[in-house]
Amino acid sequence: MESSPKRAWTPLDWSGLQQAFAPVTLLTRTQVQAYFQRAEPALSPHTLDSRLRELVRRGHLVPAGRGRYAVEPSGRPTFQPTLTRPERAVWQALAAFDLPAGCLWSTAWAHELMLHQPARSWLVVEVPKDYLRAVFHSLQDRHGLRVFLQPTPEVLDRYVREADRPLVVQPFLSRAPVQVVQHTPVSTLEKLLADLFCEPTLFYTYQGQELKTIFTNAARSYQLDAKRLLSYAARRGKGPMLREFLQQLDGWATLLTP
């Protein structure tokens, strides 16, 4: 796995900013700018605006007047990914199927929770089993997409690993926890975490110590429903294994308490 020792700022780094100003509950744009410029003296106004918008979008900060922001009390907003235009287009292309259920998600959504950044990511489209082949062939006809239907370990190793923009079509488990973002059904954080855990062969890049890092950072950074997470994992046949895994991680003991 290709990786880089340094990673760009992500909303996950909110905890550092929050700790720097605690117990202050109201921040100014100037204060936020000064915080970031400690590590990035050349920080541009445009970059600062982008970071402030993302912190607001994720619920960390709440606009409280011109150049002022209220601090979200818990510091743990709901996980809501930002979909790119191509990602939205993929789901929109399936409108003709009138799917009764399903969702879309990207492995890139886990990257902000990781220490080492993977060089590649792929899009996952989940649809009911009866629609798998029809959806696969439909997406395969779209220009520029490398589409794989339930890839075997051999296909993963020989083709998916090296593909530039792979799209993996998988069966959707009924009643899986999803949310609607930008008019598109996508995975909740609970589903994303459970899928990474339950499919170690498919999501090989996200295993080992990196998987522990992902789960630990998720618990520190976002609201999580442990019951929903374990219920979905149980329906995938991995409930007890996931609970045992979580009991070894920082930040999960309170979440697992009934």
Image (tube, rainbow, N blue to C red):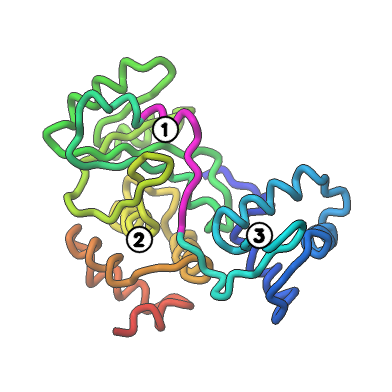
Q: Earlier in the sequence, mark 2 or mark 3?
A: 3
Residue occupied by mark 3: 63
Q: Position of residue 83 (x, y in %)?
A: 47, 39
Is residue 7 visible in the rendered image? The answer is no
Q: Quadrant of residue 211?
A: bottom left
Q: With 84 as the anchor, is 141 left or right in this view? A: left
Instruction: Tell me if mark 1 has few (under 14), some (14-19) or many (20+) residues whose alpha carbon lies within 10 angstroms of its own.
Output: some
- At x 59%, y 63%, the residue is 60
Q: Quadrant of residue 171?
A: top left
Numbered disc 2: secondary structure: helix
Q: With 31 as the anchor, is 202 left or right in this view? A: left
Instruction: Tell me if mark 3 has few (under 14), some (14-19) or many (20+) residues whose alpha carbon lies within 10 angstroms of its own.
Output: some
The alpha-carbon separation of the residues under discs 2 and 3 comes to 28 Å
Q: Is residue 195 magenta?
A: no
Question: Vertically, is 107 above or below 148?
Answer: below
Where residue 190 is drawn, which disc sits there?
2
Numbered disc 3: secondary structure: strand
Where residue 88 is drawn, which disc sits there?
1
Q: Earlier in the sequence, mark 1 or mark 2?
A: 1
State which region is magenta: 79-90
Q: Quadrant of residue 105?
A: top left
- At x 21%, y 42%, the residue is 101
